[in-house]
Amino acid sequence: MSYAQILRSSRQPGGYEAQFAGLMPPEEEQQPTRITSSRLKENPDLATRTKDEKAVQQSSRSTQQNQDLNKRIKKIERFINGITQDGFADVLTENATLLSETTALKDKIEELEETLENMQARVDELCKERQVSTIQNNPARKKRAMPQ
């Protein structure tokens, strides 16, 4: 997969960005608070039964949450494996190589620009020594030499 394809896939539905968003946990639904009725307060058996039911519900919720977490972990692992199989790591390595090559070329360009400036200064110096006028030094001659 080329770098351009990876960039496009990250912005398309079903691309890396969408896949990663699917790995995030869903918004937690807020549980409505229950107000204990006066009937439960008067009857301790109902209150005990309600507490037991709540404990069972809480236990089943925590089991469900653990299962959801395990599913998310598996999704994340598949996502990471998919990235490495698609050559994303290769693209990152290639980008690092291109960056270092670009930096080296930039340094070479700066070096060549300095050399050019030194050579132009040397030409100007030689022209002054020999009392020769150059097109570069005289704007009027430069215009005549390079008609538009």
Image (cartoon, grey):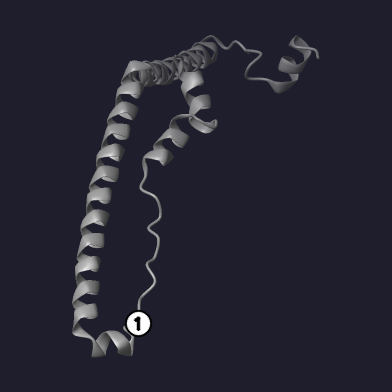
- Position of residue 61 measured from the top left corner of the image (x, y, whole percent): 27, 56
Q: Observer-nearest residue: 49 or 124?
A: 49
- Position of residue 103 measured from the top left corner of the image (x, y, whole percent): 37, 21
Residue 25 sits above or below residue 6 on the image: below
- Position of residue 138 measured from the top left corner of the image (x, y, whole percent): 68, 20
- Asked where in the image residue 80 lies, by quadrant, the reply is top left
Reading the image, the residue beneath label 1 is: 35
- Position of residue 89 measured from the top left corner of the image (x, y, whole percent): 32, 20
Which residue occupies 39% across, 50% down?
A: 26
Q: Observer-nearest residue: 51 or 138?
A: 51
- Asked where in the image residue 141 lies, by quadrant, the reply is top right
Can I make out residue 90 in this image?
no
Quarter of the picture containing the C terminus is top right
Which residue occupies 47% across, 15% down?
A: 116
SS of the residue under disc 1: loop
Q: Residue furthest right?
A: 148
